[in-house]
Image: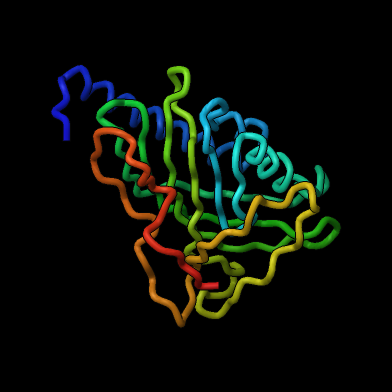
Amino acid sequence: MKKLSMEERIQRMEDVHQIQNLMGKYSYFHTADMQEETVGLWAKHTPDTWEDGPSFGYYEGYEGLRRCYVGAHQWRGEESRIGGMHLHTLTTPVIEVAADGKTAKGVWISPGHETGGPPGQKPQAFWAWLKYGADFIKEEGEWKFWHMRVFGIFFTPYDKGWVEFNIAEAEPLPEQFKPDKQTEYWTNYKPTAKTVLAPVPPEPYDTWDGKGCAGIKEKIDNK
């Protein structure tokens, strides 16, 4: 690992602070259903951007990310926001900025809850705990999301324990908002499966090595 100068160490601390703020904005925008603003947090001119999660699947490229957030998250329209509330808080961050200052990796645990349902029906309340694994890149002097994978912990009605509840199949998305492919990482709690370390917290590194926090050592299927 490269030994950093005092100036470089101070810059890395500033980088970590900026990445924390970026992730915080992501959480706030998600709660307010501000999906255009969410897309703006992503790298626009860097190849190989992608997001993957159990709710919608794997979306690749900047236009794919727009299809995910502005499309898949909002396809039911404004009426679906009535009575809806999604809150995913951020805890236990582990963030490492590359010694060259060009990329970074981070993980978070996210206790949260979601409220919603089909328009015209009584909203339902759920506990929704998950983990984020993300890679970041500095684009035009500003930190942006590069890759993100969402790992489920458990999703259950507020009045039921996670041992009792199996996740139902999600409502199919309209064709124009479907993912590039389905996720291969199902990590939600299951009584018959082991809990695994996913994502893996990052270690200090000199330069991007292709092993990001949005990646994982092996496919996980607790579905």
In percent of width and height, residue 213 lies at 39, 47
Q: Quadrant of residue 209?
A: top left
Where's the N terminus, which quadrant? top left
> Residue at position x 65%, y 62% from top?
125
Q: Report the number of numbered marks.
A: 0
Q: Quadrant of residue 34?
A: top right
Where's the C terminus, which quadrant? bottom right
Left or right, 127 with reference to 180: left
> Residue at position x 35%, y 45% from top?
93
Residue 164, above or below 131: below
Q: In the rendered view, how is the structure colored?
A: rainbow
> Residue at position x 47%, y 32% from top?
22
- Looking at the image, which residue sits at the far right? 120
In percent of width and height, residue 201 lies at 31, 51
> Residue at position x 50%, y 78% from top?
163
In percent of width and height, residue 134 lies at 44, 44
In percent of width and height, residue 154 lies at 51, 66
Left or right, 143 with reference to 6: right
Q: Nearer the viewer, residue 126 or 46?
A: 46
Q: Nearer the viewer, residue 171 or 103?
A: 103
Residue 209, above or below 185: above
